[in-house]
Each structure stands twice: as structure tokens, then as C-alpha cells.
């Protein structure tokens, strides 16, 4: 369709990204993936249960949650292999003043999917300093931090010396509508004083978590999208209380955890604000785009592993006189899973490519990011569920990664915004885009000729 490319690029925001971000040259990229696959096969898959057991031991030991010893060991190895900060796109690396891996978003989508085949889904990502919420926080600091903030917090995050968390969700309001975020950030002289409660703050439980990016209300009287700001809060600031680790389907996910946190007269300097007072929404949109798609990249890896396990299982098990793989219903489940995974991957990589070419602010890119976030987790949960069903009782047990994959996909339908918000965003953008479509203008409803009738009765008598 000749008009389609210009139609998709019509938004002024596209001018902010007139050329694609440079990518790693193909031969070097293939070598990187080969190194990563070797790392996964030799170091990640064989140590998944060790990672799980060491994390459980950390939880039992008390409230000083630290990295599992195997994670510390593999982080060193990943760094030595050049498998470090792979998430950091070329443009962000330049802003950070740091030499990243040299990948763009499209290339990272392939790499992140490989990382996502691990169990726990972020095990391999953590080994390579590519795990949430640090990746999003590092991009925020790279794009919006001052030179001093970058030196103090971004540099040690990029080096893997510390961890971070992001505090947005609140128990008292529907936080899916970010304008509801109401924790108080009141200015007193050259300080901000924070009071209120946050919860589901991922990563706060780790003793290596040294910095928090908190979104709260600095000016309740400002216009709706200028009331909130984002501010850096060191985790050792007096007045912070980690109340409890929230459980997801009975799991607390140590050593990161997802915490309820109280803030009682927590005082930080005004210089800790990011980008400026009242600009929290701008930062949130810039942060959540990459954060959402990174989660979905990993989820594709979870789906691929679930399907692989299903195919293996049904060719080994026999019921009612034949292999499970010979039942039509099983074959349909396998085929549907393959189709759905590939559909999700195509949508995701299109979004990643648009991020590179047009930037996150482009309307079509924003729509794709919302569609990916709304579609992929549900798809992965469905694929994992089919695999669980094919495994029978084993599928629910600790003997496979399927229960973990299903649980992770299900909670991701709420993390970084519920499905409904993303469908709503995508639908609104579609209505706006359709206004400029030649199909809307020139190929609408057919005219109706009401002069030619099929049959008419005689006129009624008055």
C-alpha cells in the first residue's frame, strides 16, 4: 500500500528520530549470541535449582536479603564474557557516558528472549546486569539525571555494584491511573519531605538496593499531569520502613522482593529531583516503554521453553494405547502455541524496530508498545497452561519451570499497568490514526439507492 509508510510516520515526534539507532554489525552480533547461548547451556540451565535453593535459604535466614552466591559468581563470568549491560541501547549509552554492548532495541529483543529462557525468568538477566527494575532506572538516570546524579548512582548501577528500586504503586489508590499517585513530597527550604505509603516496590528487599526513584505529588494544585515529580531517595534515609514483603501466589521472590514501604518525614535535598518539579509523567512515559517491552521479550523466552517441554513430554508419554503426540487435540495445542508465539514476536520486534527508527514518543510506536504489553503476557500464560495440561500432575510441581512461567506471565498482566490500560491506550491511538487514513476518507460505507424498491404495497387508504 503506497501511502502506508508515510501514514505511519506522519507524527511530528518521528522527526526526533530521523535515522535508526546504529546496530552492532551482523557478524559480531551473531558471535555475541553464540557466546550467550554457550553461557546459558553451561552456566545458567545447570544452576537454576541452585539459584532457587540459595534464594530460599536467604529468605529463611532473616531480613538481610543478599544475592545468591551462584548469582555473584555468574555475574563475574558474564561480565568477563562481554555479556554485560546488553539492554543499554546505543543512544542511552551515549547519554550515560558509558560504553554499552552496542545493541539497538531490535537486536536486544533477540538477546533478551534468550535470557528469558531461564528459570527464574530473570536469573540470566540478573547475571548480565539486565534485570528489572534496574534497567529502567538506569535509562532514566542516563536520560534525565544530572552529571552529579549519574556519577553517584548511574555509574555503580552500570558496574553492578549496587541495585535499585522504583516506587510508584500505592495501596490507597488505583495506581493504574498514575494521576492518582498521591504520596506527599512537600518542599521545606532546600529539602523535600516525603510522607505516605507505597507497595509492590520491586527490588527493595535486597541489601544491595541503595537508591530508589520515587514518584509522588509535589504540587496538588497544579494541572493533572504537572502535580507529580520523580525524586531520588537513598535507601538508608531515616524514616523509611520496609513493612512487609508482598506475596505473589504465596511467593515473596527473594532476594529482590516486592515491598510495602512507609515513609515518615523522609527528608532528601531538592537537588535529588529528576528533570525538574512537576515532570514525573514525562519521565514515567520514557521509563515504562522500554521496561514493558523488556518484560515481554523475556516472556517470549518463557513461552518457547514451555512449548519445548510440551513437545518433549507428549512424545514420551502414552495414554489409551498411543503417544500423546498422536492425539489431534495435542497437535492443535502445539500448532496454536507456535502461531501465537510467532505472532507475539513479530509484534514485539516491530515495536522494537520502531523504537530505534522513530523513538518512543511516536504515536504508532506507543500504540505498538501498548499492544505488546497487553497481548504477550496473556499469550505466554496460555502457552504455559497448555504445556501444564500436557504434563499432567508434573506440570503443577517443582519438577519443571512451568508453574513459575505461568505465574510470571499472570502477574505481568498487572505489572507496569494492567491489560485494560494498554488496550485503552492502543484503542485511543487507533481512533486518532484512523482520522488520517485514506480508507476512512475515501472508502467508507456504500451509498444506498432507496429509489429502487424490491416490492411496494398499494398506498394505505385514509
Image (cartoon, rainbow, N blue to C red):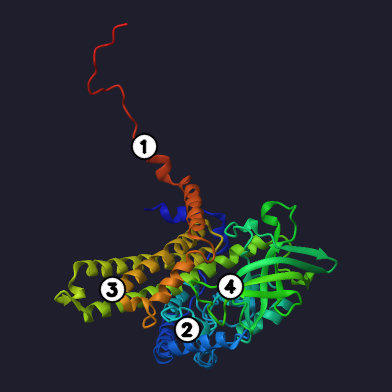
Instruction: Please give the name of the residue rendered at 67% of the width and 69% of the height, measured from the top-left corner.
Output: 214
For disc 2, the marked residue is 124
Label 4: how many residues lie within 10 Å, few (<14), some (14-19) or many (20+)?
Answer: many
Question: Residue 136: which disc?
Answer: 4
Please say if 121 is above or below 416.
below
The disc, 3 or 1, on the residue closer to the chain's N-terminal end is 3
In space, the residues marked 3 and 1 are separated at their CA atoms by 47 Å
Please state which of residues 100 and 129 is positioned toward the viewer in this rendering: 129
Please say if 430 is above or below 341.
above
Task: Please state the horizontal and vertical placement of residue 296, each as a whole percent of the image.
Answer: 46, 70
* 121 left or right, relative to 202: left
Taking the view exactly as shown, the residue that stands out farthest to the right is 189
State which mark lies toward you, 1 or 2.
Answer: 2
For disc 1, the marked residue is 445
What quarter of the picture does the C terminus occupy? top left
The disc, 3 or 2, on the residue closer to the chain's N-terminal end is 2
For disc 3, the marked residue is 390
Please state which of residues 301 and 11 is positioned toward the viewer in this rendering: 301
State which mark lies toward you, 1 or 4.
Answer: 4
Amino acid at each position: 500500500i503506497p501511502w502506508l509508510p508515510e501514514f505511519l510516520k506522519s507524527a511530528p515526534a518521528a522527526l526526533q528520530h530521523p535515522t535508526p539507532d546504529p546496530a552492532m554489525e551482523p557478524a559480531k552480533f551473531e558471535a555475541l549470541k553464540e557466546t550467550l547461548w554457550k553461557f546459558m547451556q553451561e552456566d545458567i540451565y545447570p544452576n537454576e535449582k541452585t539459584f532457587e535453593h540459595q534464594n530460599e535459604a536467604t529468605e529463611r535466614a532473616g531480613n538481610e536479603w543478599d544475592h545468591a552466591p551462584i548469582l555473584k559468581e555468574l555475574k563475574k563470568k558474564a561480565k568477563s564474557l562481554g555479556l554485560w549491560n546488553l539492554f543499554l541501547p546505543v543512544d542511552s549509552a551515549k547519554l550515560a557516558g558509558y560504553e554499552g554492548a552496542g545493541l539497538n532495541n531490535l537486536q536486544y529483543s533477540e538477546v533478551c528472549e534468550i535470557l528469558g529462557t531461564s528459570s527464574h525468568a530473570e536469573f540470566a538477566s540478573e547475571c548480565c546486569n539486565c534485570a528489572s527494575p534496574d534497567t529502567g532506572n538506569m535509562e532514566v538516570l542516563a536520560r534525565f539525571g544530572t552529571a552529579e546524579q549519574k556519577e553517584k548512582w548511574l555509574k555503580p548501577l552500570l558496574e553492578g555494584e549496587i541495585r535499585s528500586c522504583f516506587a510508584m504503586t500505592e495501596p490507597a489508590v488505583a495506581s493504574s491511573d498514575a494521576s492518582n499517585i498521591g504520596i506527599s513530597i512537600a518542599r521545606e527550604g532546600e529539602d523535600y519531605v516525603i510522607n505516605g505509603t507505597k507497595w509492590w516496590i520491586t527490588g527493595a528487599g535486597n541489601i544491595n538496593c541503595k537508591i530508589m526513584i520515587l514518584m509522588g505529588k509535589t504540587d496538588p494544585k497544579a494541572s493533572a499531569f504537572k502535580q507529580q515529580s520523580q525524586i531520588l531517595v537513598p535507601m538508608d534515609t531515616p524514616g523509611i520502613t520496609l513493612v512487609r514483603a508482598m506475596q505473589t501466589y504465596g511467593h515473596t521472590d527473594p532476594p529482590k522482593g516486592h515491598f510495602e514501604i512507609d515513609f515518615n518525614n523522609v527528608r532528601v535535598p531538592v537537588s535529588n529531583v529528576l528533570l525538574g518539579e512537576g515532570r514525573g509523567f514525562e519521565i514515567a512515559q520514557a521509563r515504562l516503554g522500554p521496561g514493558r517491552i523488556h518484560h515481554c521479550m523475556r516472556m517470549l523466552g518463557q513461552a518457547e521453553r514451555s512449548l519445548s517441554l510440551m513437545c518433549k513430554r507428549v512424545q514420551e508419554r502414552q495414554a489409551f494405547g498411543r503417544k500423546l503426540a498422536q492425539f489431534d487435540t495435542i497437535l492443535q495445542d502445539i500448532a496454536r502455541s507456535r502461531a501465537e508465539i510467532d505472532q507475539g514476536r513479530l509484534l514485539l520486534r516491530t515495536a522494537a524496530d520502531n523504537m530505534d527508527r522513530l523513538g518512543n514518543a511516536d504515536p504508532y510506536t506507543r500504540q505498538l508498545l501498548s499492544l505488546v504489553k497487553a497481548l504477550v503476557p496473556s499469550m505466554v500464560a496460555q502457552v504455559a497452561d497448555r504445556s501444564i495440561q500436557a504434563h499432567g500432575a508434573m506440570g503443577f510441581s517443582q519438577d519443571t519451570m512451568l508453574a513459575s512461567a505461568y505465574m510470571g506471565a499472570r502477574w505481568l498482566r498487572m505489572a507496569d499497568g494492567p491489560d485494560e490500560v494498554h488496550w485503552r491506550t492502543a484503542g485511543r491511538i487507533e481512533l486518532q490514526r484512523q482520522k488520517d487514513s485514506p480508507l476512512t476518507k475515501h472508502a467508507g460505507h456504500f451509498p444506498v439507492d432507496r429509489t429502487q424498491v424490491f416490492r411496494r404495497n398499494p398506498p394505505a387508504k385514509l
